[in-house]
Image: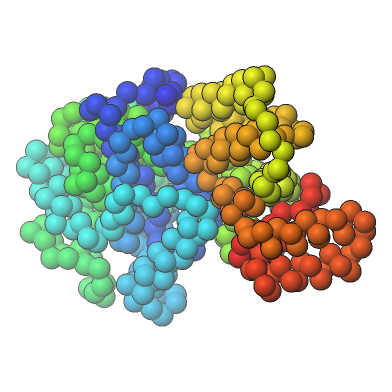
């Protein structure tokens, strides 16, 4: 399997650090508001990567943090904590905000068929580990105190900035870093960042007493500490959004490599942004849509998943409702195909050699593509070609070969193909479906509507008519 590594700027052959085991870390959401579909692009892609690893028979341990403290507005060290700020706005406690928006997040990931990581850990559940991490960094002389917190001296980490192909001097000259132009008082270098921030007297929730002062962790230290707690000193794959390369991930490397003196991450994988009218979707730009917004407009969240996986993750993805409609129709045409050909087929016969070879070739190509830099868009093109090739008079054996292949593709795509299989439906229901198809052909829409109602009422089967024919599924 091949993977593009941000740090080497190359496609590399994937080889885990230890045997078959893959330690996979994903930077999770800051649970201070509804996640928008730009955030969701991020998690759909990490899901694809996990599914591709699993398909390649790796033993994957996927760890994701939930940021419930320490992530400031503006991503630097000056702004207010995002969760504390939202709690004030909504007149709630931080805990209420965290609970509410983390459940909303997982409701969305469920709707998008995103597999749950093996470990999901909150920053606040790892304070002990974070404090230990900070203590050890301090013993090694990397930290200094200011009035507002404990800072990491980035000038002391020799390879600072290597992830973006830069270095300490250049980044400071360009004023890139958590502190940017406005610096927190007392910091030595623009790129220095807080590992611990002292709380203000009125900040009572989510603060901890420590030997270095009362307060809460910085945003970057939680990922270093959680990755270390669950995956050890080295991680095979670290994944996140493109916006994290220059600051968040750069700082994670500084902390972890300063402490353990070995390569923190073997492969860095970053997803490009989802944009609207060419602008990054983000809460501050107010150009956001949530999964709920798409549902309100009548879209199945999986149509958004399909739209997302049809664009390579290293390319910008511009979101439009027209584009979503197009993906929705394309997905429904696949569902219609599955509904139709999975109606038990009475035609017996053997699979022709040519047919079996063609399907096998498509299957081989599909899995080669998904394993080559997660090239799902091209794999999807091959799947469409296979479907078109199979739109002919198939016998029972040929039909099940096509269906089994599609179901196998869906282990990667996660589009719920199984839901549209007709061969699990009762004979009586299938008879009604066939009858309805016939009335539609004869343009007897009155009967066809009645049959649709009957199927829903008596069999809980929903029917939708699409450009490519009808689809039916259990509700
Ligand atoms: P946050 O909850 O703000 O920490 O963001 C969660 C993840 O979503 C991060 O890994 C971000 O890099 C990513 N992200 C934020 N906005 C976008 C976007 N417009 N497109 C793709 N990923 C994004
Ligand atoms: Zn992180």
Residue 386 location (% of width, % of height): 67, 30
- Residue 140 is drawn in which quadrant? top left
**Percent coordinates x, y for residue 224 in the rendering:** 24, 44
Residue in the picture at 67% in, 47% down: 344
Give the percent coordinates (x, y) of residue 142. Answer: 15, 39
Image quarter in which the C terminus is found: bottom right
391 shown above or below 215: above
Of residues 35 and 252, the one nearer the viewer is 35
Looking at the image, which is closer to me, 377 or 79? 377
Residue plotted at (61% across, 20% down): 357
Residue at 43 percent of width and 20 percent of height = 10
Q: Quadrant of the N terminus?
A: top left
Q: Is residue 231 left or right of residue 35?
A: left
Depth check: 276 or 181 in front?
276
Q: Position of residue 327 (x, y in %)?
A: 69, 46
- Taking 167 as reference, is 348 left or right? right
Residue extending furthest right? 443
Quarter residue 393 falls in: top right
Report whether residue 7 is seen: yes
Q: How many labels does the image show?
A: 0
- Measuring 28% from the left and 58% from the top, which residue is drawn there? 122
């Amino acid at each position: 399997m091949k993977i593009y590594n941000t740090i080497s700027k190359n496609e590399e052959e994937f080889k885990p650090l230890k045997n078959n085991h893959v330690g996979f870390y994903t930077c999770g959401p800051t649970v201070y508001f509804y996640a928008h579909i730009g955030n969701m692009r991020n998690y759909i892609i990490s899901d694809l990567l996990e599914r591709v690893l699993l398909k390649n028979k790796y033993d994957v341990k996927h760890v994701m943090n939930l940021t419930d403290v320490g992530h400031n507005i503006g991503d630097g060290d000056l702004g207010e904590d995002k969760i504390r700020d939202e709690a004030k706005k909504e007149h709630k406690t931080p805990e209420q905000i965290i609970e509410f928006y983390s459940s909303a997040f997982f409701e969305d990931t469920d709707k998008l068929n995103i597999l749950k990581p093996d470990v999901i850990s909150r920053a606040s559940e790892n304070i002990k580990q974070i404090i230990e991490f900070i203590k050890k960094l301090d013993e090694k002389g990397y930290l200094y105190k200011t009035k507002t917190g404990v800072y990491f001296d980035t000038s002391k980490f020799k390879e600072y900035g290597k992830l973006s192909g830069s270095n300490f001097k250049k980044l400071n000259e360009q004023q890139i870093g958590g502190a940017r132009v406005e610096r927190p008082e007392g910091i030595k270098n623009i790129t220095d960042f807080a590992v611990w921030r002292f709380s203000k007297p009125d900040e009572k929730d989510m603060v901890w007493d420590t030997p270095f002062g009362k307060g809460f962790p910085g945003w970057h230290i939680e990922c270093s500490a959680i990755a270390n707690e669950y995956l050890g000193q080295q991680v095979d794959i670290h994944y996140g959004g493109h916006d994290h390369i220059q600051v968040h991930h750069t700082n994670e490397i500084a902390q972890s490599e300063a402490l353990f003196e070995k390569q923190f991450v073997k492969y860095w994988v970053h997803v490009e942004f989802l944009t609207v009218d060419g602008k990054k979707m983000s809460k501050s730009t107010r150009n956001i849509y949530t999964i709920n917004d798409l549902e309100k407009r009548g879209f199945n969240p999986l149509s958004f998943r399909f739209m997302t996986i049809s664009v390579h993750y290293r390319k910008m993805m511009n979101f439009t409702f027209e584009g979503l409609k197009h993906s929705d129709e394309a997905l429904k045409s696949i569902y219609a195909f599955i509904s139709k050909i999975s109606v038990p087929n009475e035609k017996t016969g053997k699979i022709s050699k040519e047919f079996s070879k063609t399907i096998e070739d498509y299957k081989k190509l599909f899995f080669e593509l998904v394993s080559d830099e997660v090239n799902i868009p091209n794999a999807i093109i091959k799947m469409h070609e296979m479907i078109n090739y199979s739109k002919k008079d198939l016998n029972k054996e040929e039909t099940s070969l096509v269906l089994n292949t599609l179901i196998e593709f869906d282990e990667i795509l996660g589009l719920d193909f199984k839901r549209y299989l007709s061969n699990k439906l009762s004979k009586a229901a299938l008879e009604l479906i066939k009858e309805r198809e016939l009335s539609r052909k004869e343009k007897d829409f009155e009967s066809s509507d009645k049959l649709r109602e009957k199927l829903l009422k008596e069999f809980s089967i929903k029917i939708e008519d699409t450009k490519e024919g009808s689809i039916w599924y259990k509700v």
